[in-house]
Structures are given as C-alpha cells and as structure tokens.
Amino acid sequence: METLSSKFDWLLDAGAYLYIYCTDFVINAANLLGLSYFEVNAFLFLGLYPLFFIVVGTIYARQVVRYKALLKKINPNEHH
C-alpha cells in the first residue's frame, strides 16, 4: 500500500519534470526565434494564455446558451 509520502513524492517529481520541460521549451523557442527567454515567456503568459481563456470562456458561454435553447425546444413547458 502506498503511503501518503510516496504519493506526494510522485507529485513533486511530476511537477519538477513539467517545470523543466516547459522551461526547456521556452528556451528553445527563444533560441529559434532569436528572442530572449523573457520575451518569449511574456508573449506566452501575457498574450497567448489570456487569449486562450477568453476563447475557451466564449465557447463555453455559447454552448450553455445553445444547451438551454435545446432544452427549451425539447421541453417547452418546463422552466429551467
């Protein structure tokens, strides 16, 4: 049976691996684009990351509206 400590160690190892992979990705992208690490990092986290959440939020909101319209069409007498 795994102890809580061994599960926590696995989580720390996975987090460290993910951090190292992401850092390596940004360094390689900076080298390929001829930019600094900080410029690529800023582009990702101040540009693409917020844009991603705006797009995903918009898609979610549209799906909620479409789902409610579909429910109203299927059961017009029920209130949701």
Image (cartoon, rainbow, N blue to C red):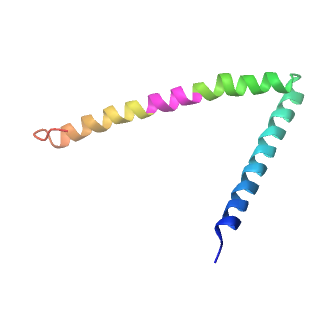
In this view, the residue in front, 34 or 47, is 47
Q: Is residue 31 left or right of residue 17?
A: right
Q: Residue at x 89, y 22 (%)?
A: 34
Quadrant of image for the N terminus: bottom right
In this view, the residue in front, 63 or 11, is 11
In this view, which residue lies farthest toward the left?
77
- Assign the magenta stretch its main secondary structure: helix
Q: Residue at x 39, y 31 (%)?
A: 61
- Residue 27 is drawn in which quadrant? top right
Q: Residue at x 72, y 50 (%)?
A: 15
Count up the numbered dots.
Answer: 0
Q: Residue at x 20, y 39 (%)?
A: 80
In this view, which residue lies farthest toward the bottom?
1
Image location (x, y in percent) of residue 69: 25, 34
Image location (x, y in percent) of residue 73: 19, 38
The magenta stretch is 52-59
Image location (x, y in percent) of residue 47: 66, 22
Q: Is residue 28 magenta?
A: no
- Residue 13 is drawn in which quadrant? bottom right
Image location (x, y in percent) of residue 24: 84, 40
Q: Is residue 74 left or right of residue 4?
A: left
Q: Is residue 50 above or below residue 72?
A: above
- Residue 42 is drawn in which quadrant? top right
Q: Is residue 9 left or right of residue 69?
A: right
Q: Is residue 31 above or below residue 12?
A: above
Q: Is residue 64 left or right of residue 22?
A: left
